[in-house]
């Protein structure tokens, strides 16, 4: 919580106003933020200065790991975050590549599970990483990236959290995740939860101990219509200790993640929090 609140204060105190063409709403912005999560100690980075709902973030992560390309698929597993981008983003609605209602196109998990190669075949980046790590192999290229500039026009949104690099040191697995753009009041806690849970899950299914997760953000911002709530409400609250995340130990393989795992397989304990804050969402 300290590093999260420090970033929020840094943006409020030192940020620069930037016009955002996509949303039409100004952002108070800083460049370069580094967050760290101790997965080994199970210090789950769930925001305590407002009530946060962690299962939707985990549902979204499961959808990415399965390569989902439809907002309907995400809704079916308990995540509504793609409804607006799939169905209310005017640029995507006008895009001739859109296949109809709820279509997201080739974004996020589609790239991670089915990256299209020049010869027309597809590369499953996640399976390569899981297979290598399961054999104790780290070729210093255990990377999953969703960022494919050659196919931006084929999806409703460029990925924000775009690349995940796994590093195996002995029997301990670490993760470094890169994010180009971050809506700090509303989106960051989703991202924090997903980075933490991704390392915990991949360590569990590959037979390693989880270590540290490093979260690197390039452009961290607070939208103008979020600023008052952040400055005058959330930043005036005292944080509580971090809760712990409990993952079903029966999850043992990538196939498990692809087939039967649900948000019911994830629980938290020790979560104390302040009242919820309804931050506006910029489409």
Image: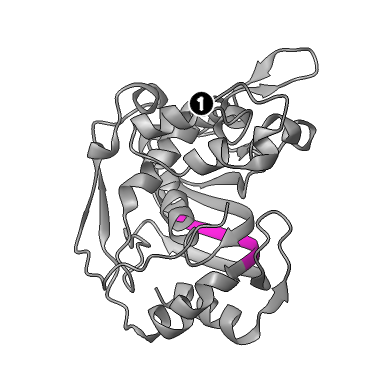
Residue 248 at least partly seen: no
Q: Dividing the picture into quarters, in which one does residue 192 lie? A: bottom left
Q: Main secondary structure of the magenta part?
A: strand
Instruction: Answer left or right for 247 relative to 9.
Output: left
- When asked about the image quadrant of residue 13, the answer is bottom right
* x then y, percent, for residue 159: 63, 44
The percent position of residue 26, horizontal first and vertical second, equals: 67, 69
Residue holding disc 1 = 131
Q: Quadrant of residue 264?
A: top left
Decide whether residue 140 is among the magenta residues. Answer: no
The residue that appears at 44% across and 33% down in the rendered structure is 63
Q: Residue at x 64, y 58 (%)?
A: 181
Q: Nearer the viewer, residue 234 or 45?
A: 234
Q: Is residue 184 above or below residue 157?
A: below
Residue at the limit of the structure toward the top, as seen here: 120
Closer-to-camera residue (199/56)? 56
Magenta highlight range: 212-220
SS of the residue at dot 1?
A: helix
| Residue name at image x 46 percent, y 72 percent | 4
Identify which residue is drawn at 47% across, 51% down: 195
Position above or below: 261 against 9 = above
Q: Nearer the viewer, residue 212 or 261?
A: 261
């Amino acid at each position: 919580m300290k590093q999260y609140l420090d970033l929020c204060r840094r943006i409020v105190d030192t940020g620069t106003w930037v016009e955002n063409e996509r949303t039409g709403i100004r952002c108070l912005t800083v460049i370069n933020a580094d967050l760290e999560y101790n997965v080994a100690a199970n210090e789950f980075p769930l925001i305590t200065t407002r009530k946060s709902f962690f299962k939707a973030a985990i549902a979204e992560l499961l959808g990415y790991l399965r390569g989902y390309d439809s907002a309907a698929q995400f809704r079916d597993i308990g995540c509504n975050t793609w409804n607006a981008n799939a169905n209310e983003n005017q640029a995507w609605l006008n895009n001739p590549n859109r296949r109809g209602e709820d279509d997201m196109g080739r974004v996020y998990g589609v790239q991670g599970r089915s990256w299209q190669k020049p010869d027309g075949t597809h590369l499953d980046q996640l399976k390569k990483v899981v297979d290598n790590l399961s054999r104790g192999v780290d070729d210093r290229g255990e990377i999953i990236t969703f960022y494919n500039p050659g196919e931006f026009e084929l999806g409703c949104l460029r990925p924000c959290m775009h690349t995940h690099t796994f590093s195996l040191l002995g029997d301990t697995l670490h993760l470094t995740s890169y994010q180009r753009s971050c809506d700090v009041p509303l989106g960051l806690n989703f991202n924090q939860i997903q980075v933490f849970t991704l390392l915990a899950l991949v360590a569990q299914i590959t037979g390693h101990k989880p270590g540290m997760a490093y979260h690197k953000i390039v452009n961290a911002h607070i939208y103008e219509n979020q600023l008052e709530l952040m400055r005058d409400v959330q930043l005036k609250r005292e944080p509580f200790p971090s809760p712990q995340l409990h993952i079903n130990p029966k999850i043992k393989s990538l196939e498990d993640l692809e087939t039967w795992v649900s948000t019911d397989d994830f629980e938290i304990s020790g979560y104390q929090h302040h009242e919820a804050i309804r931050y506006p969402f910029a489409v």
